[in-house]
Image (tube, grey):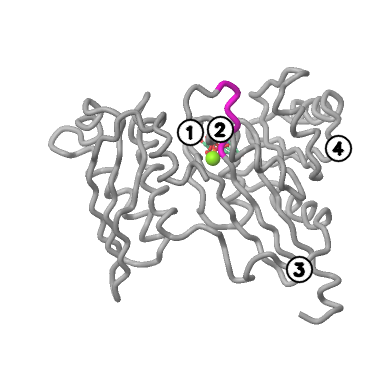
Amino acid sequence: MENSEELKHRAGFVNIIGRPNVGKSTLLNALIGERLSAITSKAQTTRHRILGMLNGDDYQIVFSDTPGHIAHPINPLHKAMNVFVEGALEDADILLFVTDKYEAYADDDEFVIKMQKSEGQKISRLNKVDMYRPDEAIDLVNYWKEKFGMENVILVSAKEKVGIGLLIEKIISLLPVCPPYYDKEALTDKPEKFFVSEIIREKIFLNYDKEIPYSTEVVIEEFKEGDKIVRIRAVIYVERESQKPIIIGKNGEKLKKVGTEARLAMEEFLQQKVFLETQVKVKENWRSDESALKGWGYKG
Ligand SMILES: Nc1nc2c(ncn2[C@@H]2O[C@H](COP(=O)(O)OP(=O)(O)OP(=O)(O)O)[C@@H](O)[C@H]2O)c(=O)[nH]1
Ligand SMILES: [Mg+2]
């Protein structure tokens, strides 16, 4: 890169934070124009920090999708998820705080206070505007400005892709002058294997209720790219023996449905034919098992 171009190039980390289910992953996908992050109507879908890059000739925005901050963690997995969020509060050039009209924060909410104290510039994004009446939207912008001193309050619908272009412009204007952090061709920092496991997890969140999605982890044991087909072997871990038949379903039909939905989404993501094999295993109480959490990338 020539010197004069270096002086113009902007780059930085834009960390998307907020409580569970407000639409952070939907926003990441809308911003980068790819379906990277899993989206479901259930809270606590995202469990990891996921980077997604948006590259232009003279900018690189490194977005981080994060798990929703859990106000009252009840197990080591929750705590590990909150550690990803705390990290994101600390290393942002810009914090993109996401909320919606259904959320209420107390004046002394710890998460909001931590966010206000963090060094990054802040943009608050009120999501799901497709669900607001116009007067409601104005009141909410004023509420966030007055109650929490938020300056950049932007109305967006991640789902309907309303306000996304304006949000990107705002972000670029706030980015520091800096050379790119990652290869300009890169879309994310995580391997394809990670997204493939997330696709299966997403389908599990969509197909089962109550504790099942939360008790499940997906591990890709084999990911072999051939000329015409990618062969994938996935193990679905549950926490108790009694959960296995629920995942599998009568005559294996439920698991077959999940497998088919996941395979189709993988083929779309990888742009290749996929052969997917799934197996269900038990890892007793893995959400409280420190070594399992470490092995599965929840802890450093
Ligand atoms: N109506 C409407 N729904 C939305 C919008 N953005 C997200 N949603 C829905 O809100 C739900 C949660 O979206 P996610 O993107 O998974 O939310 P999240 O904040 O990443 O959730 P966690 O990963 O659990 O923290 C999904 O059902 C989305 O379809 C929006 O702009 N409008
Ligand atoms: Mg999410």
Location of residue 232 with respect to 248 vertically, above or below: below
Question: Disc 2 marks which residue?
Answer: 21
70 in magenta: yes
How far across and down, in percent of the image, does residue 13 sit? 71, 53
Amino acid type indicated by mark 2: Asn
Which one is nearer the viewer's eye here, 260 or 180? 180
Question: Disc 1 marks which residue?
Answer: 41
Q: Which residues are magenta?
A: 67-72
Residue 151, disc: 4
Q: Is mark 1 within 8 Å of ligand 1?
A: yes
Residue 160's image quarter? top right
Mark before the other along the chain sequence, 3 or 1: 1
Residue 179, disc: 3
Between the residue at mark 3 and the residue at mark 4, the CA separation in whole angstroms equals 27 Å
Mark before the other along the chain sequence, 1 or 2: 2
Q: Is mark 2 within 8 Å of ligand 1?
A: yes
Between the residue at mark 1 and the residue at mark 2, the CA separation in whole angstroms equals 7 Å
